[in-house]
Every structure is written in structure tokens, then in C-alpha cells.
Amino acid sequence: MKALIITAVIDLLLGISNGFPRRAVYENESSLVLVHVIYRHGDRNPDETSLYPTNPYYAESNYYPYGYGQLTNPTLNHPVYLLSTYFADVVLDTGTHFFVGILSQRFTSLFQEGKLREYEIGTKLRQRYNTFLGRVWNTSVLEVRSTDYNRTKMSAELMAAGLWPPSCINLWNPILSWQPIPYYYEKAQNDKELSPWNACNNFNNLVDEFVETPEIARYMADRYNETMQILSERTGLEITLLKAFLLYFGFAIQEELGLPLEDWVSSIYPEPLHSLTIDFYYIQTNTTILKKIISGYLLKKILSDTEIQIDGANPQGRKMFLYSGHETNIAALLLSLDVYKLADVPGYGSFILVEVHKIDEVHGIKLFYQDYSTENPQALKLPGCDEFCPFHQFSSLVQDILPESDEECLGFFEMFVMDILWIGSVLFIITISEAVPIRESTANETTLKLVHVIFRHGDRNPGKSQLYPSNAYYDEMHYYPYGYGQLTNNGKIRMYELGKIIRKRYNNFLGSQWNMNVLDIRSTDYNRTKMSAQLMTAGLWPPRRINIWNPVFRWQPIPYNYERAENDELLSPWLACSTVNTLISALLESTELGNYMSERYNETLHILSENTGLEMSYLQAFRLYLGFSIQDELNMPLEEWTSSVYPEPLHSFVIDYYHIRTNTTELKKIISGYLIKQIIENTENQINGTLTPNGRKMFIYSGHEANIATLLLSLQATKVVDVPPYGSFIIIETHKIDAVYGIK
């Protein structure tokens, strides 16, 4: 064992670099225009639905610390794991730091489970597309989309970490070779592109109808009736084709994890259950309408994004779309396109590349599939076309399986019910602080039961709406490489430090080992808040021992959730609730408040309008204040005329605007009430022992200064006399003291 660890150390030291390959590997980069990557998540634990109740390994405790369905790490007795935990403890306990880069290829190939495998896919794609992608990342160059599963969200973070290590200009932390890259997702019930089996409520009915056709029914009965009967008798479950499909994955994963299968399983696993699983993929893609649903919506998006790129209408610099999905996404797309004879379940980390090239002035598509049966991805041919298939010919050949509208899907609809919020006489003691180190912990962790943290994102560039066209710094090039509204390196550092502050305050309460149950983190639908969520959790929960997946990375992927801004009543109510602006307008027109604002700020609004050329509303003036202050922070000189309005009286106007937004009970209900209601519900469930999942200790909300200011004002907890700064936060602690639950 000692020799293995020494060998691993040598490989590690030889493999450390700046994260970028020294030369390009892929010879066709010169003609490359755009890349779409569809890949399967990494190795994982079984879902509860893929197990049966009498299984000796049914309980979730067998899959500690990650739980059902989550990504795995290298095994506990593997030299990679032993090495990583040793050096991680050296770093934590002695303060020794390594200037880290990527693992050498030999070292990472020692053991590739879950997290490590997904990271390695990113490094392989970086090698393939190094010249094409370039070294500097920004939000325009890459779009990452995931399904609404923790394992695919974490795979998205890991893949992006391997694909895009920070270059010099992106580097925000010299001892952490990682940068936050946000991902996107749709709720499963709305995700036609990546989760059509959840989003399209007619899909399973169509599958059932096809299976019941006489020829298919006979074929399936002859081959699998005995298998289904054995499964039913032994598991005690009602066995459908879908349930048998799911149980196959349970058996396969249990075997991968070294957990012995019961003796009876050998009569049906791996065969004939493996063959049933492959047949099920073919059934799901056997008719044109099934292909339209299970692959058509994704293919339609890929072709649409490609056409936009060819027409030059994509975001400037867009080079890649990543889709973090499941084996079914891979299998269904291969079969729907009829480009590959599927004989096995697509493995963890398998991927499809849809490359867009421009060759001899013709735009076309090349397809590749990597199942790791060969070193390099295999080139595929669409029937009726060559390996390089002109775009319009490709589109024509797949036209039959592209859905014309959402009618083929007929997805689910969610109903939203607005409840009246009642807040009882609860005492809130609010802590608002800038992100600076706290010397001593002030939390009484012995009585602590639950924590809610609401914080403002880190330092950032101005949004385009906060600038005016004649501003010398209006053009986005002034905010390279990140662009309008994105976090700066100072912002990344601040968010990481904020996580460390929260860790110091709650270290004993949280414990050292992270798992999916202990923390829920939610962001607004902005890149800067998503990245702030990633950075904050990186500082809050560095990996220790069993959480370590890579010995040179003091980081672990922790997924965040969000709602689309137009639906986010909790954190973006000013966008989700159309009545906010109506109520504010009515308030200003019908009360003395309107006269007060006119007398104090009409001249300010007039100066702003004359000098910016913009139509000046209260909201626009509010935005311009933020633009001026950010420009000031970035040391970009303001025009001379701004001194007549900035910082005063525009600063006072902004503070008054926060008060206007929370001036009536109705406005408070909308602007802060939904969030307060959620916090109270979480707290009541914790007190009653009904909070799920079991073990939840903290809720984190990554938001904006408006969330902080309006929550403080709605609760009348403190006077707001300034804009809540970057990294400011509110903590709501639930304690049990002398058998009484209460809030601090």
C-alpha cells in the first residue's frame, strides 16, 4: 500500500500543470464552428425506485454519506482516496498549500468513480478542443444545461471544472484551481428536451400502446414473462416493463459498489434482464411519434442553436453547449437518429458530440459517440449522408422526428395558489454583516436546531440596464472577460470568504461531512447569484475525508436550485408578481408619499433624463445609482455632470425606494412575505419533526441587495440607511432553550 501511495504521489507531482494541455489534440479544430455535447452523469448510488424492500441493502444508510441516487467517490481503501485524505488533512491542519492543477492522465485513470469520472471528461474535451475554446472563460462562450437531478447538476459542475480551469485572468484563488461556472435546468415536469419521460404525460401511454400491439406483446412475452414472474415473486413488487428496467440498474449499481446480490438474482441478472433493458430502449424509440418525444425536442433545440450560430445571431463568442443527462438521453438519441446499433447500456460518462464545421464554405455536422470501447470518440454516419453532412441536408433527413409544437408532448401544468401570509409576534434578531472575518463564534450551537441564511451576491460588473448609451464605459468590452452584470474576481473571493465565515460560526453544528440532506441552497435566476452560491458553498464545505474525490482539489460540487425569474415569488417577487409595480404606482398617486418624492427628487430625475437621454422612471433612476456606484468601485471615472446627483441625492432616493417597496401591508406580503412564509414553514416542520429530508440543518438563499433591504424593512428589524453591501447577509436561527423553540 505504501508503494502504491508513493507511486501516486510521483504521478501527482509530475502531472501538476496550469490545467491546459500543451498542444492541440484534435486536428479538425480549424473548421470547427460550434459543439454540442450530450453526456451521461458519473457513477452513482441506486435510487430507491431501483431497489426492492426485502433487499438487504435497501436502506439509505447503506449509501452514506451521499444517499440514494447520488454521485460516488473512489472506494475507501483505494490509494487515491488514502492519498487524498492524507494530503487534505495536511493542508487543513498545518496550513500547507499546494499550487494545484490537474491530475496527470495516469493518476486519474487509477480509479474513476462518479465525481472523478465527470471531471476527467472535462479534461478530455479540453484536450480535444483546446485551441477552439481558448483559455478565457466567460458566460457567453459556454451554456451548461442539466436535468433536475442532483447527480446531473453535480456532474455539470465537475465536467465544467475539468473543461475550464481558470486561466490567469480568471484566477481568483491561487490555491484552488477551480472557477464557478453556472448551469441551467428546467423542472423535470417541464423539461421536454432532457426529461421528456417526465414532461410529456402521453409518453408512457404511447409506450404501453406499442407494447400491447400483438407482435410486440408476443415477442416480449416469449422472451421475458418468466423473468417478470421471478422478479414479482422475489421482490414482492408489481412488475411492469418499466419496473424491471429500473431494477436492472439497481442490480448493476449494487454489483459495482461491491454489495453482494442475493442468490436468486443470478437466474435473471445480468441476463436476460440486460437484454430486456436494451429492448426497452428500442421500444421507446420504435415509432415516429415516440422518437419525436424522447429525442425530438432535444434535437430540435440543437438544430435551432446551430442555425442561429450559422446566421451569426448567437451570443458573441458562443462555442459550446453542454447537456448533463442520463443513459436514456444517449441511447434514445443514437437510436432515433439510427446511427448506432445499441447492444449495451451507455456507460457512465459516455457522450455524443454534435460538431458544427464550416468546410469549403459549407456548414455541416459531424457526429461522434464515445462509449470508451476505443480511445477516441467514434465517428457516426446519419443514413443518407456522409460523415460530414451539410446542415440543410441533415435537417431535412431528421425532419420527420422533429416535433412541430408542444402538442406532441402535452406536458403537465402547475397550479399556483396565493395564500395570505400571517406573521405572528415572533422576535427576529437580525445579523447583517459585511463579508469580513469573524474572530469568535457567536452562535450557541448546543441549542441550535436550524439555520436560514439570506445573502447578497459578490462584487460584480454593472448590468447594461444600469448604464446609459453615452457613458464612456457603456460598451461591454470594458468588462472583459466576464461581461455585463457578472461577478468580478473580488466578488468571487468575497463569496468564498463568506462561506468560511458561516463555516466558522456553525462548524460543530454542521459537522465536517457534507451530504445531500444537510443543506438546501437556492439562488435567483442570475449568473452572479448562481456563481455566488457555488463559491459560498465552496468556502462553507471544503471536502474532508470521505467527501474527497480529487486529492488536488479543495472543492466538491454542491448543487443549487432556482426558479425562473418570472416564477420566483420567494427571491424575485418584483419580477414574478406583476402587481408590485401597479401597487407602487397607486401608492405614489394616492398618498402624500407621491408629493414627498416629487419635491425631493424631480430635479434629480430631470438631470438624469437630460444627461443620459433615457426616459426616467423611479426604477430607472434606482438602476442608474447602482451603475454609478459599480463604475466608481471599478475605478472607471464618472462624467463630471454626475457629481450633481451622485452620490447624493441619488443615494437617498434609493433608500427611499426600498421604503416605498415595503410601505404597505400588501407590498410587504408580496416583496418579502413569500420568503418569510417559507422560512416559517421550514421552521415549523423542524419543530414538529416533519422537515424532510431528515438531517436538514441549513437553508441558504443567494440573492440581491433588494432581498436584504426589503426583508429588514418588512420585519421592522432595523433601519436601512444604506444599500446592503456585497456579501451582506441575514441569519435566522432556530433554537430550543429550556424546552421552548424560538428565533434569533
Image: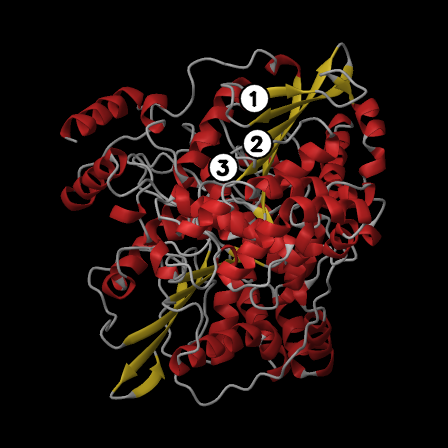
Q: Position of residue 595 (x, y in %)?
A: 68, 77
In the image, what residue occupies the spot 71% across and 20% down? 381
Secondary element at image label 1: loop
Q: Which residue is mark 1?
A: 377
Q: Position of residue 260 (x, y in %)?
A: 36, 48
Image position of 120 (left or right of 328): left
The residue shown at (17%, 40%) is 90
Q: Earlier in the sequence, mark 2 or mark 1?
A: 2
Element type where label 3 sits in the image: loop
Label 2 Cα crowd, 10 Å radius (few <14 / some 14-19 / many 20+): many
Q: CA distance from mark 3 to mark 1?
A: 15 Å
- In the rendered structure, are the residues bearing label 2 and label 1 in contact, judged by CB atoms less than 8 Å apart? yes
Above-or-below relation of 175 to 435: above
Give the mark, 3 or 1, whose residue is nearer the N terminus: 3
Label 3 sits on residue: 348
Q: Secondary structure at mark 2?
A: strand
The amino acid type, in three-letter code, at marker 3 is Tyr
The residue that mark 2 highlights is 351
In the rendered structure, the answer to whether residue 611 lies left or right of residue 114 reads right
Q: Is residue 193 visible?
A: no
